[in-house]
Amino acid sequence: MGFECQQCGECCSHLGLVHIIRKDLGNFHFIVYNQYTSDETEVTVDPDKHDLFLDQSIFTKLPEACPFFRHVPSSEMAYCTVHLTRPEICQDFSCWRLLILNHTGRRIGRVMFRRSLVTDDAFLTRVWEECIDPITETDVTVWDKEVVRILTQAGYLVRQ
């Protein structure tokens, strides 16, 4: 299974440090400037997200958020309001190598691309330290399969 966004919003919470609105072209059309690459991209707020985009309250809680990021507290879902025309860097992004879910399907951890674990779960941390950290396999595919096997055996669901 390929990367599937879980709409947590973690990736966009600080992208206001990267993407800035260079120009408002009107009618929900904008030029976005990437401060790292100097790329400019024309984006359009998705038609079904106009009202969501107009709500600027997210910036009170997350002042560094991407200018097009919105979070709906009632659903705990995050949205890119320019998803259909988002910049290429956003299209190419995936925030995990392996996604780790508990038995109810709730995300409790993720393995990042350099084989590092991100979690607050004590049991998962212990499994990682005792069973996965010692693996010295250099072949990425073999390593991933072994990690999935170990985590599955420990009762976790893993998405690749």
Image (cartoon, rainbow, N blue to C red):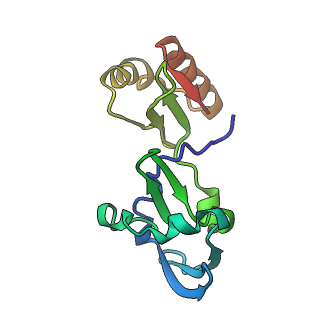
Quarter holding the N terminus is top right
Q: As rendered, which of 27 and 20 lies closer to the eye?
A: 27
Residue 110 versus residue 31 in the image, above or below: above
Residue 18 versus residue 131 in the image, above or below: below
**Residue at x 41%, y 65% (from the top left corner):** 65
Image coords of residue 74 (percent x, y): 43, 46
Residue 70 versus residue 130 in the image, above or below: below
**Residue at x 67%, y 68% (from the top left corner):** 85
| 20 left or right, relative to 159 | left
Quarter holding the C terminus is top right
Which quadrant would residue 146 be assigned to in this image?
Answer: top right
Q: As rendered, which of 160 and 9 lies closer to the eye?
A: 9
Q: As rendered, which of 136 and 6 lies closer to the eye?
A: 6
**Residue at x 56%, y 22% (from the top left corner):** 148
Image coords of residue 78 (percent x, y): 49, 52
Image coords of residue 139 (percent x, y): 62, 32
Image coords of residue 129 (percent x, y): 35, 23
User: Total marks drawn?
Assistant: 0
Residue found at the very far top of the displayed protein: 153
| 139 left or right, relative to 65 | right
